Image (cartoon, rainbow, N blue to C red):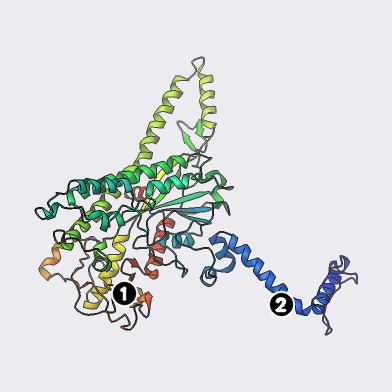
Amino acid sequence: MIVNNGSPQYHMSLDGQHSFFDQYGCRAVLVWLSSRMFRSGHKLILQVIACMAAVLLLTHSLPQRASDVALGRGYSDWIGWARGKASEAVGDASEAAGLRVVVFGASDIATLPDTKKGDMAWPEVMCEELECTTYISLVPKPPTRSLSSNSLYAAVVDELVQASPKDKAASPGRDYSFYPDHFPVPWHVPDFGMQVSEFLSRPQPSKSPKETIWVFNFGHWDVWNLAGLPLKRSQVVVDAMVKDVIVNIEKLFKASSNETSIAYSNFRARDDSSRPDYLPKLRQPAVTVGDGAKAIPDQQVGEPFRIIVPMIFDATLSPGWKTERPDLPPAHSKAEQMRNAATLTERWNNKLQNAIEEWVRTSDRESARQAEEEEEEAAASQPTTTAQSGADSATSAAAAPSSTVPLVRDAIIYDLQEYVTEMIAERQLHDHGYVDQNGVGGRPEDKMFREVASPCINAGSDKPKTINTSLAVPKDDEDANRPTSRRRSMRVARDAAKNPDEGVAQSSAVCKDPTEHLFYNSLSLSSRAIDDIGKETAELVVANMTLRGFWANSS
């Protein structure tokens, strides 16, 4: 019973006996504490401040994600010295042993240049949407420009510099002696191989994650740097870089099977009840074979080694191609570089997608080869005494569970190029009053970006430099020949615009509403666009839109 008589509440049980609250002196302790607080009222403020400082120091020592869970997502926004997001390694995979996201790559167009404002990179947005417990990023902080392979890029640049003619005036088109000054080799920035080595050199966490999603985001700055070189040589380098990417992915794949490696995920720590719906079950149901006399016990299926690889965006469509691209000698025009960049972007995306698909199929070939070897071993060890002993031996061998869970390669390919070009085409078609056969142009106004040409921040001059994204609307007789692919049907002009950007305040270099702009600055998308990319990628993960899932649905 609780009685209020104008004084502090006191507790008594229904049978008249003192309650548990009184029997153990809790009430006396509270009375003593309250009296001490009133007697030392001048110290109360100092005590509260000390407690708040202790809480802040404690949360600061926690990984970023744990701090945001405790104090809310905006915690890092108002506490200046809190641990940063986006490009920093967050946690060590030991805080909850759940889902881990590990990111390798470069700070490209989908990375904001300033992470102090609390904005997240798209892989971290995906991590939050999937409720991951650990986020580790090996991506160097902007404005660094990481390449997939420094050595491959350095080799082709050095070769062309060495082959440059001594008489530059006689053959200006063959002169590349200037190239290291404009597009130097970023030896101080870790490439893919260096990032992988740094990650694998870390100690194993106290608790291994139950599963890991790997993100690999390279190619943007590779194409940016290679666009000024001869196209035939650049294409060869792109092919070599794609092969190098697969080599490093395979290195992580093999390390993931080592229980002493930081790359290892403890799949056995998760049972079917706690397993996400978008992943296959750990065990297959029992299957009756033959005439029903024998049944195969539950067999463990392979755990997916899932990677996410975005296709790179054509940098010539960004405002930064006009404002940030260095001016090369007249013999190497920007028009030529633009054609090279568009060709290399398409080549990178096609080569990488084909290489990823071939890499995923490697697991099928390995499984088939392993099955053949097991059949041969079983046939060689088959006893020949009696039929009964042979049957008993086969049954016991089938009942023995596998000691390890095999890893199966799988991948999600996100088309970043399609997202950006779709946002541009949506605005272009909407402004002209058109909707194409795929519905592009009919999106609600609040789902579009009002400005898709000029960035929110114009650092080059007071008067913003823009690119023209006017749409060339096909005539009626051309409709039958238009591509059916959404990505291929978006045509964006790259000529300079005549009209200034009305969405940017003329007296300031920063726009009034960054969420209305597709580009935050000349080389980066806005935070709204980056959030969209992260959420779309998370939806692909939840829906299990992997290559294997696509192949299974197509068959």
Q: Quadrant of the N terminus?
A: bottom right
Is residue 226 something that shows in the picture? Answer: no
Q: Residue placed farthest to the bottom in the image? A: 6
In the picture of the structure, the residue carrying the numbered disc 1 is 458
Q: Residue placed farthest to the right in the image? A: 16
Dot 2 alpha-carbon crowd within 10 angstroms: few under 14, some 14 to 19, many 20 or more: few
In the picture shown, does residue 369 fall above or below 201?
above
Dot 1 alpha-carbon crowd within 10 angstroms: few under 14, some 14 to 19, many 20 or more: many
In the picture shown, does residue 313 fall above or below 43?
above
Secondary structure, mark 2, is: helix
Tell me residue 340's x, y (percent).
19, 56
Q: For this view, does 405 lie left or right of residue 359?
A: right
Residue at x 41% of width, y 66% of height = 531
Is residue 35 something that shows in the picture? Answer: yes
Secondary structure, mark 1, is: loop
Closer to us: 210 or 276? 210
Say how many tags the image has. 2
Closer to us: 28 or 440? 28
Label 2 and label 1: CA atoms lie apart by: 47 Å
Q: Amino acid at mark 2?
A: Ile
Tell me residue 370's x, y (percent).
41, 31
Residue at x 47% of width, y 20% of height = 381
Checking the image for residue 26, the label placed there is none
Q: Residue placed farthest to the top in the image? A: 385
In the picture of the structure, the residue carrying the numbered disc 2 is 45
In the picture shown, does residue 371 fall above or below 120?
above
**In which image quadrant can residue 495 be found?**
bottom left
Q: Amino acid at mark 1?
A: Asn
Sequence-wise, which precedes: disc 2 or disc 1? 2
